[in-house]
Image (tube, helix red, strand yellow):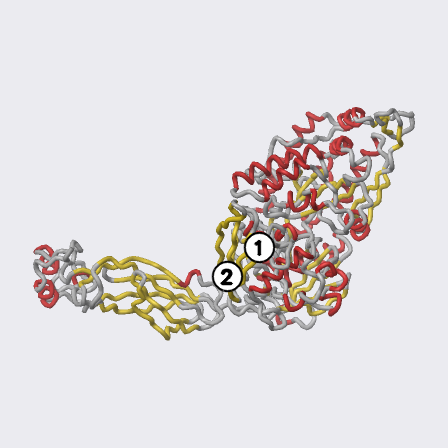
């Protein structure tokens, strides 16, 4: 048995990482759009169809044959080479922080022994896997549960496990695992000298994913080579998931998770409280239970500031990687692809060969990263149509849980996120929160037993509706938070567990009106906004009749065959294991096309005006929506409204400038900041750009053209020197045109002379 020298391997791995960084740059210089533009309304197609295939090869073939427009999985190296020069496809680079790992059952012996787990961690042949399987393209290697690219969160000092079977054997021997009886397999000698045969490790690898299949093959060979017996099963996802996530009858499994926008999963997935073998689909399916780890992930999760969270996150990583509840191996890289043009589907001739527009290459995941995230399903459309056609999306597997509470797999998320809306969304490029069902929010603290705790106030948009036409309001939000707790939701329980009184009949959630919800937490946390913001809101009028612990067998879909939704789509039809056809939801609050106007400029001719005289102010409003609008503009001087201008017509795609003449008679002396506000038009959602503050006007004594509060000789002289001028003449100055008639004459000089020597009284 020959093994690579560990120090040599470390050097080769570093060189490989540098090489792939250079190659990745070259791969995408001609392909990546680099666009960070996306729309917040849609959907732009009539239908979204999820078509289910049994494995990666099948969905790639469907993509190449034009049966689907894009697929859920990144391209492997061979597929990349097939598509990279094909004009029928657009390839986009992938930035994705997921994790493919070896799940280890921490309850079953011998993998319950952390020394045994540490030994297995030294059997990941990173070099061969990276070069021969990933081909230095389809993934990047991990040496920690947090990615090194997350620099401020990553702990470089956490334990590393380089490939070294000799080290693995040394660790095993020190823990009592040796070949005690001379047969080909290891045994364990207990402290009382009793020798036990090792059980055959039940090792499951995913057949539908070639990369994870190859990873399982490699690790299984090394386990057997050092004398660890295995029952190695390469099976479809349904079998693997039954063993790993429902019955927990496994030792090792080639798992995957993520992608993630932040490190909260360290708590949500691996805190001891979520290791619950008595129920299926528990999040902590490796059953990692460690009090020190719990302490640090709690400190991270409930940190009042980012610095505290970062420190706790690094400490948690150190414990995690020392105890090895699982082995992080690689994360996705390379590219994803979509078809450049609409296919020749029967009955859809008006869209044939139109270029696909609106594919969004997300970095920050809503569900996934890359071109198959939420934003593409909202934005993609053929050609220049406002809405039309069918977007076909290939899946490698079907969803398991057709309800918004038990969201477990990535395919569960793909489906549910198109059907249900959240209070907030993440910008797919910056990660900043953007308004969604909630148009605004405030984060405060309140006194919880003498300690500061977080208080969130969220204001919903007006006139939100469910897909059955019923109103969506603050009572649905409050109901959702309580229901997710009572249902012990695998995905959302960690988001609601610290709401004050959540374990009682009356949680501390206030709904003072239909649009306002106030949530009181028992902790102060930098993550609290994401807890409320990322939870899908469910309809109270539907789910209040369903017992929270019966969502799987008595949920809405089980009993009716459909779901009442608030997202961009609703279920049109389906055939389990084959397809889901979703239809654009006309009740979606961002259904569009959007009505959207914006105030672009507030321009004045004068900066100084004598009280009692006029000042002209120009307000420019742009229509960035899709319909001609009739706008109302309100103009403010400081906090006072000085004019309301109705009936301003603005054609879509153009701007209109309206001039208002401000009569300053009776206005107090002083500086006035100018602000224009275009009232939201019917159906307008984005209103942040309706208000613009720009510049000021000083109201002084008539004739005080330099604004020094005193009418003197130099004021009269300045007017006299401009005598006879008008706009366009270099001598003309708007402040010198006292009566605002665009001509400086004796009337202006006389108006100033009548106030000669006057000052503003103190």
Q: Is residue 67 above or below residue 92?
A: below
Task: Tell me which residue sits at (72%, 62%) in the image.
Answer: 547
Q: Is residue 305 above or below residue 378?
A: above
Task: Tell me which residue sits at (66%, 71%) in the image.
Answer: 348
Horizontal placement of 410 versus 514: left or right?
right
User: Residue 530, position in %: x, y?
Assistant: 57, 51
- In the image, farthest residue toward the front: 449
Circles 1 and 2, Cβ within 8 Å, touching? The answer is: no
Q: Nearer the viewer, residue 275 or 620?
A: 275
Horizontal placement of 709 versus 100: left or right?
left
Q: Nearer the viewer, residue 718 or 35?
A: 718
Indicate which disc residue 459 carries: 2
User: Residue 371, position in %: x, y?
Assistant: 61, 54
Task: Tell me which residue sits at (27%, 62%) in the image.
Answer: 604
- Give the quarter of the figure containing the C terminus: bottom left
Task: Tell me which residue sits at (9%, 60%) in the image.
Answer: 720
Among the two numbered marks 1 and 2 on one chain, the one whose residue lies closer to the N terminus: 2
- Give the quarter of the figure containing the N terminus: top right
What whole-number distance in Å separates the C-alpha atoms at marks 1 and 2? 12 Å
User: Residue 78, position in %: x, y?
Assistant: 71, 47
Indicate which disc residue 22 carries: none
Label 1 element class: helix
Residue marked by disc 1: 532
Q: Is residue 340 visible?
A: no
């Amino acid at each position: 048995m020959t093994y690579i020298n560990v120090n040599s391997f470390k050097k080769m791995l570093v060189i490989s990482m540098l090489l792939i960084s250079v190659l990745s740059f070259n791969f995408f210089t001609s392909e990546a759009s680099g666009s960070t533009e996306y729309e917040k309304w849609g959907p732009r197609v009539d239908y979204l169809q999820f078509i289910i295939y049994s494995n990666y090869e099948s969905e790639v073939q469907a993509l190449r044959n034009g049966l689907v427009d894009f697929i859920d999985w990144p391209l492997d190296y061979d597929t990349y080479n097939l598509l990279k020069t094909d004009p029928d496809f657009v390839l986009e680079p992938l930035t994705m922080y997921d994790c493919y790992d070896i799940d280890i059952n921490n309850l079953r012996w011998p993998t319950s022994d952390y020394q045994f787990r540490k030994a297995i961690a030294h059997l990941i042949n990173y070099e061969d896997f990276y070069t021969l399987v990933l081909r230095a393209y389809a993934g990047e290697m991990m040496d920690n549960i947090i990615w090194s690219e997350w620099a401020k969160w990553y702990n470089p000092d956490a334990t590393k496990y380089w490939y070294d079977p000799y080290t693995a054997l040394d660790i095993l021997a020190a823990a009592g695992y040796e070949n005690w009886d001379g047969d080909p397999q290891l045994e364990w000698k207990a402290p009382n000298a009793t020798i036990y045969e090792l059980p055959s490790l039940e090792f499951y690898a995913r057949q539908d994913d070639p990369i994870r299949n190859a990873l399982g093959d490699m690790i299984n060979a090394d386990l057997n080579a050092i004398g660890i017996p295995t029952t190695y099963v390469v099976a479809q996802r349904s079998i693997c998931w039954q063993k790993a996530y429902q019955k927990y009858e496994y030792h090792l499994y080639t798992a995957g998770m993520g992608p993630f926008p932040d490190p909260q999963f360290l708590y949500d997935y691996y805190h001891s409280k979520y290791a619950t073998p008595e129920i299926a689909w528990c999040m902590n399916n490796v059953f990692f239970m460690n009090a020190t780890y719990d302490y640090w992930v709690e400190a991270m999760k409930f940190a009042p500031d980012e610095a505290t969270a970062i420190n706790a996150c690094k400490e948690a990583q150190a414990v995690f990687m020392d105890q090895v509840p699982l082995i992080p191996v690689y994360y996705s890289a390379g590219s994803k692809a979509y078809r450049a043009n609409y296919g020749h589907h029967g009955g859809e001739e008006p869209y044939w060969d139109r270029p696909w527009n609106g594919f969004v290459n997300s970095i920050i995941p809503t569900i996934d990263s890359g071109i198959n995230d939420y934003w593409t399903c909202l934005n993609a459309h053929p050609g220049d149509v406002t809405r039309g056609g069918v977007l076909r999306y290939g899946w490698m597997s079907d969803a398991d849980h057709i309800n918004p509470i038990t969201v477990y797999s990535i395919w569960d998320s793909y489906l549910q996120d198109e059907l249900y809306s959240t209070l907030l969304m993440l910008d797919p490029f910056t990660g900043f929160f953007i308004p969604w069902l909630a148009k605004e929010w405030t984060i405060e603290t309140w006194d919880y037993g003498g300690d500061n705790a977080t208080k969130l106030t969220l204001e919903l948009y007006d006139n939100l509706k469910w897909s059955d036409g019923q109103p969506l309001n603050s009572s649905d939000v409050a109901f959702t938070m309580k229901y997710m707790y009572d249902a012990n939701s695998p995905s959302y329980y960690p988001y609601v567990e610290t709401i004050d009184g959540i374990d009682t009949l009356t949680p501390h959630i206030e709904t003072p009106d239909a649009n306002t919800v106030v949530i009181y937490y028992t902790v102060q946390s930098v993550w609290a906004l994401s807890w409320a913001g990322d939870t899908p809101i469910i309809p109270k009028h539907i789910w209040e009749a369903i017992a929270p612990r019966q969502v799987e067998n008595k949920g809405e879909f089980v009993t009716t065959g459909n779901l009442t939704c608030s997202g961009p789509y609703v279920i049109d039809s389906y055939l389990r294991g084959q397809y889901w056809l979703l239809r654009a939801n006309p009740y979606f609050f961002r259904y569009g096309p959007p009505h959207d106007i914006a105030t672009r400029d507030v321009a004045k001719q004068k900066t100084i005006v004598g009280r009692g005289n006029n000042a002209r102010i120009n307000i420019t409003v742009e229509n960035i929506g899709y319909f001609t609008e009739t706008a109302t503009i309100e103009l403010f001087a400081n906090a006072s409204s000085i004019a309301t201008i109705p009936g301003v017509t603005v054609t879509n795609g153009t701007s209109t400038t309206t001039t208002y003449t401000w009569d300053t008679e009776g206005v107090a002396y002083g500086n006035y900041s100018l602000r224009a506000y275009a009232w939201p038009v019917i159906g307008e959602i984005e209103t942040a750009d309706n208000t613009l503050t720009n510049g000021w006007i000083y109201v002084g004594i008539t004739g005080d053209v330099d604004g020094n509060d005193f009418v003197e000789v130099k004021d009269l002289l300045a007017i006299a020197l401009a005598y006879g001028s008008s706009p366009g003449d270099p001598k003309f100055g708007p402040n010198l045109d006292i009566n605002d008639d665009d001509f400086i004459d004796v009337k202006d000089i006389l108006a100033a002379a009548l106030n000669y020597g006057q000052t503003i009284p103190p």
